[in-house]
């Protein structure tokens, strides 16, 4: 099964978190990312070196675009789960991308994704 990687796991990897690095190195499944995750990652980039590192990382992975059907689904997911689970609109967009692509979501924040049956938490945040 393909895996869609949430922003928090990618940030840990790019910052050299040992658990995240180990997860990526030991995984054999193909990874993809949502275009929303790409936007979140660039929003937090600090300096040209980090941007270049991020560019290289993203060039190695498929990016799932957000189209109208995914946007609609995300809006409905947000409406349903925002108050009960703290699901933000970004989480809902990522969830819609995971659903549409049949991907397992890899995240450190399972609580925000109750609508997905395939969610994997690769390590505990310390």
Image (cartoon, helix red, strand yellow):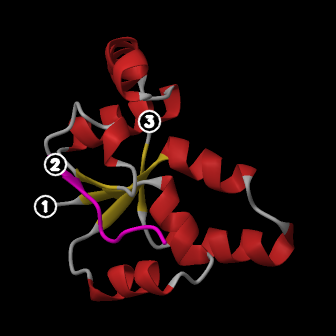
Residue topped by disc 1: 1
On the picture, is 74 further left or further right than 45?
A: left
Quarter assignment of residue 65: top left
Which x, y percent locates residue 39?
Answer: 63, 46
Q: Secondary structure at mark 1?
A: loop
- First reached walking from the N terminus: tag 3 or tag 1: 1
How many angstroms separate mark 2 from mark 3 (CA)?
15 Å
Magenta stretch, residue numbers = 118-126
Q: Residues within 10 Å of mark 1 (few under 14, many from 20)?
A: few
On the picture, is 40 further left or further right than 25?
A: right
- Residue at image coords 42%, 29%: 87
Would you say residue 94 sits in the magenta stretch? no
Which x, y percent locates residue 106?
Answer: 31, 58
Name the residue nearer the viewer: 30 or 112: 112
Name the residue nearer the viewer: 60 or 98: 98
How many angstroms separate mark 2 from mark 1 (CA)?
10 Å
Q: Residues within 10 Å of mark 2 (few under 14, many from 20)?
A: some
Q: Secondary structure at mark 3?
A: helix
On the picture, is 123 further left or further right than 48?
A: left
- Mark 2 and mark 1 residues within 8 Å of each other at the beta carbon: yes
- Residue at image coords 58%, 84%: 16
* Residue 48, numbered label: none
The correct choice, above or below, for 63 with respect to 55 in the image is above
Residue topped by disc 3: 91
Q: Residues within 10 Å of mark 3 (few under 14, many from 20)?
A: many
Q: Is residue 74 visible?
A: no
Q: Disc 3 vs disc 1: which is toward the camera?
A: 3
* Residue 118, numbered label: 2
Look at the magenta stretch and give its main secondary structure.
loop
Q: Secondary structure at mark 2?
A: loop
Q: Disc 2 vs disc 1: which is toward the camera?
A: 2
- First reached walking from the N terminus: tag 2 or tag 3: 3
């Amino acid at each position: 099964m393909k895996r869609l990687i949430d922003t928090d796991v990618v940030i840990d990897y790019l910052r050299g978190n040992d658990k995240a690095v180990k997860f990526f190195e030991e995984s054999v499944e193909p990874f993809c990312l949502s275009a929303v995750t790409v936007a979140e990652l660039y929003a937090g980039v600090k300096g040209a070196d980090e941007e270049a590192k991020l560019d290289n990382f993203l060039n190695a992975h498929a990016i799932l675009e957000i189209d109208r059907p995914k946007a609609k689904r995300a809006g409905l997911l947000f409406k349903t789960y925002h108050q009960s689970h703290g699901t933000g609109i970004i989480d809902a967009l990522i969830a819609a991308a995971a659903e549409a692509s049949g991907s397992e979501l890899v995240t450190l924040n399972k609580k925000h994704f109750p609508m997905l049956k395939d969610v994997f938490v690769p390590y505990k945040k310390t």
